[in-house]
Image (cartoon, grey):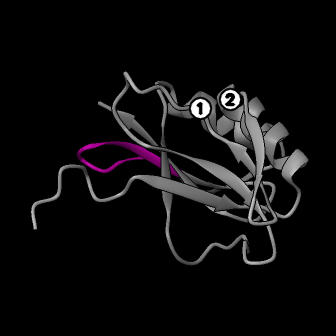
Amino acid sequence: MTQTTNPIVYVEIPVCDIDRAMTFYGAVFGFEFGTTIIDGNEMALLPFNEKRAGISGDLAKGEINKPTHDGVLVYFATHDIAATLHRATTCGGRVLYPVTDNGMGLVAEFEDTEGNRIALYQQK
């Protein structure tokens, strides 16, 4: 069967405190959130613009949502990786992997206020 989209279409980032997480991601990336409840889980919806490439997702608080350093790693695009990483640490996160040129672009990783390992990517 031929797929008509890229394989990943949506991402949920698990959180323990939805308000704290929205404050953190809002300050680090400038995001504004819509909120909803789906199947008893609180969701803070990340921005989505159909005219832009890429996917979106949400911050998800619920019994099955457990923040972790293990497992899937989500990369957020940024135009200024050093400034974004600085905002993350200023807002309560901590650097896990410093800004590094991986040959395709610049990457870095930080721990968010919920305990997730999150990555950044800046195109060359």
Q: Secondary structure at mark 2?
A: loop
Residue depicted at x 30% and y 50%: 102
Q: Amino acid at mark 2?
A: Phe
Residue 47's disc is 1
Image x and y of residue 42, in percent: 81, 56
Q: Secondary structure at mark 1?
A: loop
Q: Quadrant of the N terminus?
A: bottom left
Residue 31's disc is 2
Q: How many marks?
A: 2
Image x and y of residue 58, in percent: 64, 49
Q: Quadrant of the C terminus?
A: top left
Given residues 63 and 122, the one toward you in this image is: 63
Taking the view exactly as shown, the residue that stands out farthest to the front is 39
Residue depicted at x 53% and y 76%: 71
Image x and y of residue 9, in percent: 40, 52
Task: Label the magenta part by its dominant secondary structure.
Answer: strand
Q: Find out whether residue 116 is within the magenta segment.
A: no
Mark 1 vs mark 2: which is more N-terminal?
Answer: 2
Q: Amino acid at mark 1?
A: Pro
* Residues at discs 1 and 2 in contact (Cβ within 8 Å): yes
